[in-house]
């Protein structure tokens, strides 16, 4: 803005990867976040290994009723199946299960929930936003809608047991789609070519609808209605949180579409997928990565909130959320049951947030200058 | 020496500005001397990145903070020290000393009306009432040549073209009758025809108001039209200074010559324009010796080693090049 | 202007219609049945189940059910499946309970977040900035209910103030002042908790917005006019930095329904959020769908409101 722009060589973009890494390293909190996250990842992997199998090193499911609610660091009394080294590192819960082992198992589960949920959300968001931003003004015509409707109807018919009519309808609509591709110009009737709504408006309308549901309320409703399972929770969190990514990718694509290098690629005859994936997506990826990092943090928090309300990942899986939620009944008698998972969630989410913010500063150098 | 002479309005001596960005630190301006007399127009010329804007911002006390600071030197405006340790002296900026910027499109606040933005300085510096401020704003808008001033007063910046916005910026700058106007490449962001209009407006205004002006540009072509004196900057230093006509006719420093060569103009029709080879070095990677030697056609071994001093030349000129300075004009190289 | 309103309303009504369809489908296509109409529920004989199904139109095809349901909703005839109370009445009562919590929470959020964020931006890199940044990140990263329990532990143990529910049991006949005091205590903690994350997020956002604006050319112009630094910051920069928050202002409305499920559950606060939770637990479809409808209306109203506010504040925006 004032003087620095006269020194363009020092800008992040020109400095390349090494420069970016150097700039990132200077952001102490973000670096701490990254280090902590890596440590956590290692811990989760070790945890998954140590708590799995028939004869695990640390058994998170072993019930020892005579060892209930032992405080942290207490030595196991003589008895069957002592924990590792004979010490309950973080104490035991109301069933005498080793909290340390449960926390280790939970680390892996929480991480899985966070990553898969965000993976789904990012994938859907990029797809929806990319389509809206790239195809933007192209109209969806009546024939497209009819074909999609026929496809859906066929699928539903087939799914509900009317196999033969369903398959027939499915086949017919697929044929119709193929014909449409081949002979674009000569649709038989003008009516079928009537534009209904353009692609961008269509996708954005879906986003509008999604935004009308308060997100936690929606997640809660769907999770409560569906049979409880880890897959449901990951899918629901993922499918209800993609609109931010979609909006972002769309905006980015809208502006990239007009840029010279995309024009040049098009002029060279690069096809739509090539332009989308090779030329445009990499440019939009940085901010998506930022929102994904922050998304993992919020997915872990959402899971713990659901656990608190009794709709979290169901037993026998231990997650930090359901350890915390179960521990609250013993808040006064066994505070470690609340503190251990609470602090663990705090630290991991904090690490993700700090790392994400650091990434954001890198991706958006303007914000960096303000620091 | 010049600061003491009568009629000097702005005297910059030995100005050094340091930038600190993340881990690197460098001098964007180093040991800069510059004077502007009352009613005189001085052009500060140089390629982008040579420290012109930094000099202007230092005079205005608008260097980006944190990041830039004046390390040494003095800036005296009518005897008032502007580069002191304490806060920037009150009653100078915006009142006796004003500035217009390179980017008229972004330099106006989008949420306030034109009238409000002109009147603001008037009510603050002169204590005018809303009504008086409005009347004067109206006169100013008319003076800078905007049609239908009364309507413009309540308009918002986004309704104006780039040229119109620069006119508004000029009106804002001139609101409190400043003695010195710093114009930082005011036409660079504008269309060619609009550039000419703005330049003509500034030339008119300085004559009518007896305004002193420090005009910053990278375009030597502008110099002949507006300036009495020129200071050519390169890599944070003044490399040549003197009367505009003299320098344009008979440049001494190789850099000035190169800039003139690159200029399209009369008598050059049909000839190939020569670009100055290479680019201005980043101030953090300033070459040893004469900063220009890597690009200089006349460079000699000594240029690589010793940093030349500004050598006075007869005719109120000075040049920072021992190779081209006429013999006997100064004490020679070194120092 | 009117043209914009009409077009925007038409669009939003259409979106609302789609929302009703989608939410209806989500509820009715999900596997499982509410207890009253579940043929596996031993409490109900097949005849009773049949009667319920008829009473709730569950024997009709889905599109007809849809029409009947929303007809009942708009005519105020729809009743909760759990206790046969009219849905709107139930919601109205809970709404009045939620309102003070929501109002105090929102007020806390907006009055605290702005000064904090602006101050941090102006003194960026300083002690205050680092301190608030640290606290903000911790608040954002804490599971809300964990934080709530820590606070409850603290308040109950050190101040000996009972905080669960809307008032202390047995205080109904206490002197008015005493009762008010009791109510305020009961209100303050949940409101503070409900707004904690909001304050943290919003203040960070205010800070970054302010920082971005501080570097704009027009702020430099304001400085070049020789105006005092306070005028530059709080007039020229702040006015521009605040613009995006007008759009957010409209978006706080839906928080009335969905924002407080967890907080209200912890504090046994009989508000809308807990009602939604209980309705979901009991698969009380009319209540869920009505709450959802209200939430959607609030969202759409909120966006309209922010559009209008934005147009009023930013001269560059013309509603057309």
Image (tube, coloured by chain):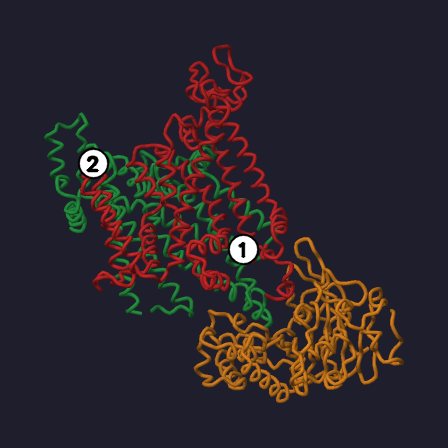
The image shows residue C210 at horizontal and vertical percentages of 52, 59
Which residue matches tag 1? A364
Which residue matches tag 2? C82
The foreground one among A193 and A314 is: A193
The answer to whether residue C203 shows anywhere in this view is no
The image shows residue B241 at horizontal and vertical percentages of 76, 78
The foreground one among A1 and A71 is: A1
Observer-side mark, 2 or 1, equals 1
* C242 sits to left or right of B197: left
Q: Where's the N terminus of chain A, which quadrant?
A: bottom right
The image shows residue C197 at horizontal and vertical percentages of 45, 45
Q: Chain of mark 2?
A: C
Q: Where's the C terminus of chain A, which quadrant?
A: bottom right
The foreground one among C251 and C173 is: C251
Residue A292 vertical position relative to residue B261 in the rendered view, above or below: above
* C285 sits to left or right of B333: left
* B64 sits to left or right of C146: right
Q: Which chain is green?
A: C
* B327 sits to left or right of C216: right
Residue B219 vertical position relative to residue C228 in the rendered view, above or below: below
Residue A112 sits in quarter: top left
The image shows residue B129 at horizontal and vertical percentages of 51, 79
Q: Is label 2 in contact with label 1 (beta carbons under 8 Å)?
A: no
Number of marks drawn: 2
Label 2, secondary structure: give it.
Answer: loop
Label 1, secondary structure: give it.
Answer: loop
Chain A appears what colour? red
Residue A162 sits in quarter: top left
Residue A216 sits in quarter: top left
Chain B appears what colour? orange
């Amino acid at each position: 803005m004032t003087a620095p722009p006269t020194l363009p060589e020092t800008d992040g973009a020109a400095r390349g990867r090494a420069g970016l890494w150097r700039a990132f390293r200077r952001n102490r909190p973000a670096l701490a976040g990254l280090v902590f996250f890596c440590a956590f990842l290692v811990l989760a992997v070790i945890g998954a290994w140590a708590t799995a199998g028939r004869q695990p090193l640390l058994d998170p499911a072993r019930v020892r009723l005579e060892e209930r609610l032992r405080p942290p660091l207490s030595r196991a009394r003589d008895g069957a199946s002592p924990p590792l080294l004979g010490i309950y590192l973080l104490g035991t819960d109301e069933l005498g299960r080793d909290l340390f082992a449960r926390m280790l198992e939970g680390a892996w589960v929480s991480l899985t929930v966070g990553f898969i949920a965000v993976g789904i959300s990012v994938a859907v968001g990029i797809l929806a936003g990319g389509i809206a931003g790239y195809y933007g003004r192209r109209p969806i015509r009546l024939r497209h809608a009819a074909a999609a409707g026929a496809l859906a109807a066929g699928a539903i018919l087939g799914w509900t047991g009317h196999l033969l009519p369903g398959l027939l309808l499915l086949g017919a609509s697929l044929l119709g789609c193929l014909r449409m591709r081949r002979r674009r110009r000569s649709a038989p009737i003008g009516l079928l070519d009537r534009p209904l709504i353009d692609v961008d408006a269509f996708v954005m309308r879906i986003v509008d609808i999604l935004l009308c549901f308060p997100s936690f309320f929606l997640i809660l409703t769907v999770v409560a209605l569906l049979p409880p399972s880890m897959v449901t929770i990951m899918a629901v969190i993922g499918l209800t949180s993609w609109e931010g990514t979609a909006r972002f990718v769309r905006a980015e694509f809208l502006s990239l579409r007009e840029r010279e290098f995309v024009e040049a690629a098009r002029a060279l005859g690069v096809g739509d997928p090539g332009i989308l994936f090779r030329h445009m997506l990499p440019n939009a990826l940085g901010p998506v990565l930022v929102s994904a990092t922050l998304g993992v943090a919020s997915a872990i928090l959402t899971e713990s909130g659901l656990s608190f309300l009794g709709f979290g990942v169901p037993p026998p899986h231990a997650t930090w959320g359901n350890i915390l939620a179960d521990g609250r009944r013993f808040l006064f008698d066994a505070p470690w049951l609340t503190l251990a998972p609470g602090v663990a969630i705090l630290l991991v989410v904090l690490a993700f947030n700090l790392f994400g913010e650091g990434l954001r500063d890198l991706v958006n150098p303007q914000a960096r200058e303000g620091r | 020496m010049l600061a003491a002479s009568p009629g000097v309005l702005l005297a910059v001596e030995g100005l050094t500005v340091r930038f600190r960005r993340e881990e690197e630190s460098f001098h964007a301006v180093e040991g800069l001397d510059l004077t502007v007399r009352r009613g005189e127009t001085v052009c500060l010329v140089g390629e982008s990145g040579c420290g012109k804007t930094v000099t202007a911002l230092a005079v205005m006390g608008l260097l980006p903070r944190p990041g830039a600071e004046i390390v040494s030197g003095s800036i005296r405006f009518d005897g008032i020290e502007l580069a002191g340790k304490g806060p920037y002296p009150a009653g100078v900026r915006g009142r006796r000393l004003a500035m217009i910027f390179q980017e008229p499109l972004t330099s106006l606040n989008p949420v306030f009306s034109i009238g409000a933005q002109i009147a603001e300085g008037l009510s603050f510096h002169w204590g005018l009432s809303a009504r008086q401020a409005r009347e004067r704003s109206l006169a100013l808008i008319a003076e800078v040549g905007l049609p239908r001033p009364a309507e413009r007063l309540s308009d918002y910046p986004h309704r104006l073209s780039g040229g119109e916005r620069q006119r508004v910026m000029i009106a804002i700058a001139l609101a409190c009758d400043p003695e010195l106007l710093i114009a930082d490449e005011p036409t660079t962001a504008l269309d060619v025809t609009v550039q000419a209009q703005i330049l003509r407006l500034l030339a008119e205004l300085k004559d009518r108001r007896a305004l002193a002006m420090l005009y910053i540009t990278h375009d030597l072509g502008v110099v002949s039209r507006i300036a009495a004196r020129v200071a050519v900057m390169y890599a944070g230093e003044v490399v040549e200074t003197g009367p505009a006509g003299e320098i344009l006719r008979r440049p001494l420093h190789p850099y000035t010559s190169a800039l003139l060569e690159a200029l399209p103009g009369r008598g050059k029709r049909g000839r190939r324009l020569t670009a100055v080879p290479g680019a201005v070095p980043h101030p953090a990677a300033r070459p040893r010796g004469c900063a220009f030697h890597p690009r200089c056609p006349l460079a000699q071994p000594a240029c690589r080693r010793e940093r030349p001093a500004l050598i006075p030349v007869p005719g109120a000129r000075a040049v920072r090049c021992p190779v081209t300075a006429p013999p006997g004009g100064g004490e020679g190289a070194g120092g | 202007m009117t043209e914009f309103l009409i077009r925007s309303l038409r669009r939003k009504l259409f979106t609302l219609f789609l929302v009703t369809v989608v939410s209806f489908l989500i509820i009715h296509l999900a596997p499982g049945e509410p207890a009253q109409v579940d043929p596996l529920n031993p409490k109900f004989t097949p005849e009773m189940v049949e009667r319920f199904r008829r009473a709730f139109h569950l024997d009709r095809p889905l599109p007809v059910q849809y029409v009947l349901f929303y007809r009942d909703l708009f005519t105020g005839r729809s009743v909760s499946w759990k206790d046969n109370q009219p849905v709107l009445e139930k919601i109205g009562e809970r709404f009045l309970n939620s309102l003070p919590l929501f109002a105090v929470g929102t007020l806390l959020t907006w009055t605290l977040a702005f000064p904090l964020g602006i101050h941090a931006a102006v003194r960026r890199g300083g002690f205050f900035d680092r301190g608030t940044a640290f606290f903000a990140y911790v608040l954002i990263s804490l599971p809300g209910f964990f934080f709530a329990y820590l606070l409850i532990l603290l308040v109950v143990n050190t101040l000996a103030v009972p905080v669960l529910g809307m008032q202390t049991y047995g205080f109904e006949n206490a002197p008015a002042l005493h009762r008010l005091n009791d109510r305020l205590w009961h209100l303050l903690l949940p409101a503070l908790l409900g707004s904690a994350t909001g304050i943290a997020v919003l203040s960070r956002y205010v800070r970054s917005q302010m920082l971005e604006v501080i570097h704009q050319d027009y702020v430099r112009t304001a400085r070049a006019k020789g105006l005092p630094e306070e005028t530059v910051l709080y007039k020229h920069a702040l006015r521009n930095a605040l613009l995006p928050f007008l759009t957010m202002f409209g978006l706080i409305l839906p928080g009335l329904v969905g924002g407080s499920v967890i907080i209200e559950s912890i504090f046994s606060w009989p508000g809308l959020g807990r009602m939604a939770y209980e309705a979901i637990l009991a698969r009380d479809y009319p209540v869920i769908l009505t709450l959802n409808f209200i939430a959607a209306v609030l969202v759409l109203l909120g966006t309209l409101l922010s559009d209008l506010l934005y147009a009023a504040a930013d001269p560059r925006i013309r509603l057309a």
